[in-house]
Each structure stands twice: as structure tokens, then as C-alpha cells.
Image (spheres, grey):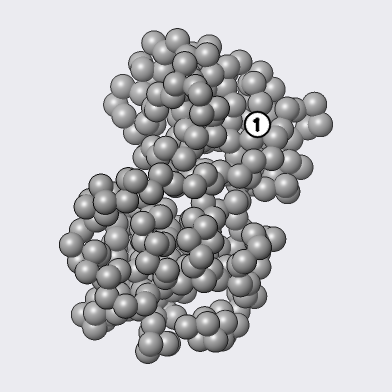
Amino acid sequence: MSICVAGRFPPPIGGVSVYVTRRYAGLLKASEQVTKLDFSEKNFLLNLFNSKAQKYEVNSLNLFVVLAFLFLGKIRNSVFIDHNASRHYSGIKRKLLLAILKYCDGIYVVNPKLVLFYPPQFNVELISPFLPPDESEYNSIVENYPEPVKTFINDGSFTVNSAWKYIPCEGEDLYGVGTSLKLLDAIPSMKLLLVIGIYEPEILPEECKELIEKHIESGRLCILTGQHQLWPVFKKKPTCLRLTPTDGDSVSVREALYFSCLTIASNSIARPKGCVSYEYDSFEDLKRVLIEHL
């Protein structure tokens, strides 16, 4: 038996995965029996301690999670997946992380540049975190969407921006939440589905709060909060935005491309074939590209 320890949204430093989906379990061999553990569960450490699994696939490089696998004696049976989390580590924290990971069974990375973080003797493998979804689950997933969201995605063309949460970054925010709201305000023909896993309106800048209130009232903005699989939304063929200053191999981008959605992404990394890139840090270039393709 194998265990997949996974999260819907790859966490930044200090974060913890909080939702499990089948696609990560699918990284293990299909013939293996897979059990899923959720970091957010109250008894996670106890369940991990009691586990007798032969292999663990861990979708986090959070230092506390890595330490838990070390202290509970699971490290040698564990493969850790680096979804771009290693970029947060430097100095003493980097040395400590690598000192622990040298005992693990291997490292999966989702971007070739991430390999450079690891010493040559490490067992590092390049993978894609995306596997095609099981489309037979479509109805059961959509049933769990709030009614306003179901109405919104069935009412004509729209654009999607997906974020784990609002995280300030380089004068903007990591997932371009504020940027997508500014686009909505600047392009009258645009409608936006803003997906935020952990929605904390109290931490948003006043400008974002004002734009949210304005465009929810206008009917051009809908916000989907909480942990949801997003691929059923992409079956509606929206325009997908990926507005990040850095990235791994984004699952949402892969999903959007799989369902033949127009996908507009920052040029901060090399993007998969089919993406339309824009100059990150240039709102005008992003606006131009989006208007050209709407």
C-alpha cells in the first residue's frame, strides 16, 4: 500500500496543504492502493505515526512536514514533490532542509530550473503534476459549487483567475488577484470568476475591496471560495489567467490547456505549448493581450 500526502494548492513557505485530490495520488503507479492523508486533520501526526505504508508521496516541502517524516521514521520511504517551494529556502533553512532530504527516497520537481536547488548526489526526477481528470466525476463536483457560481459559469463567456489566497508580493500579490480586478474594471466586456481557496477579505487592499463590491453588484464578478476542483469550470471554455511572478508547472494551466481554453500567462517562466504570454510587470501588455483574444 502507498500513501499520498497531498494538497490542492501547493503551499508557500509556512503554509500547509489542506485538501487532497486524486490527481496527486495518480502520480503513484495506478496499480498501487492509495490512501490519502490531509495535513489539516487534527490527528494527522498520529495517523502518520500508525501508518505502515511502503511508500509516501508528499506534496509539500514545508520544513515542519519534512521534520515530521524524519522524526516519525518515515523519511526513507518518502518521495517529496517540489512545486516551486524550494525557492523560499536559503541559508540555514536550506542547509537544514537538504540535510534531512538526503535521507528520503527521492525528489520530484515540476520545473527543470528547480533541479538546480539540489546537490548532484540527490535523486531528483522531473515530472508533471497534471494527470487528466476523471470526467465521470463532473456532476458530483459541480453539485458542490454554490448556486451563484453555477449560474455565472453557465451564463456566457468569462475569464478565470485562481489563487490559493491573497499573498502580497513585489508591490502586487502572488496570484494577481488585484491585477485581475483591475482588468475587470478596465475592460467593460470582461466577466471574471475569481477563485480563492482561503478568502480573507479583511486583508485585501481598499482598492480591491472597492472593485469587488462594485463588480459583484454589476454582475460581472463572481467569487468562488473554499477548496474545489476547478477542471469542470474549464470545460466551459473560459479564458484562464496565470498572473504569477514565478511558478512551477501550474496544474490550473495544464487543466485549462487540456480543455482547450485560451490561457494567458506571465512570461516569468517558460510556459507549456499553447499558452499566450505577456510581459510580467506590464499591466498594459496584459490588457492588450487579453483584449486581442476576448
110 sits to left or right of 223:
right
Q: Residue at x 32, y 45 (%)?
A: 137
Q: For the view shown, which residue lies furthest in the left direction?
A: 147
Dot 1 falls on a residue whose secondary structure is: strand
162 sits to left or right of 129:
left
Q: Mark 1 points at which residue?
A: 107
Q: For the view shown, which residue lies furthest in the right direction?
A: 120
Q: Which residue is drawn at 49% across and 67% down?
A: 261
Above or below for 251 versus 70: below
Q: Which residue is drawn at 41% across and 18% down?
A: 48
Above or below for 110 versus 168: above
Q: Residue at x 61, y 58 (%)?
A: 246
Between 183 and 264, the one lying in front of the other is 264
- At label 1, counting other C-alpha atoms closer than 10 Å, the crowd grade (few under 14, some 14-19, many 20 or more) is many
Residue 56: % across, % down: 52, 22
Please say whether residue 235 is visible from this viewpoint: yes
Please say whether residue 95 is visible from this viewpoint: no
Between 107 and 198, the one lying in front of the other is 107
Q: For the view shown, which residue lies furthest in the front direction?
A: 136
Above or below for 226 versus 121: below
Residue 58: % across, % down: 52, 30
Residue 216: % across, % down: 24, 76
Mark 1: amino acid:
Ile
Query: Image quadrant of residue 22?
Result: top left
Query: Image quadrant of residue 292?
Result: bottom right
Residue 283: % across, % down: 55, 80
Marks counted in the figure total 1
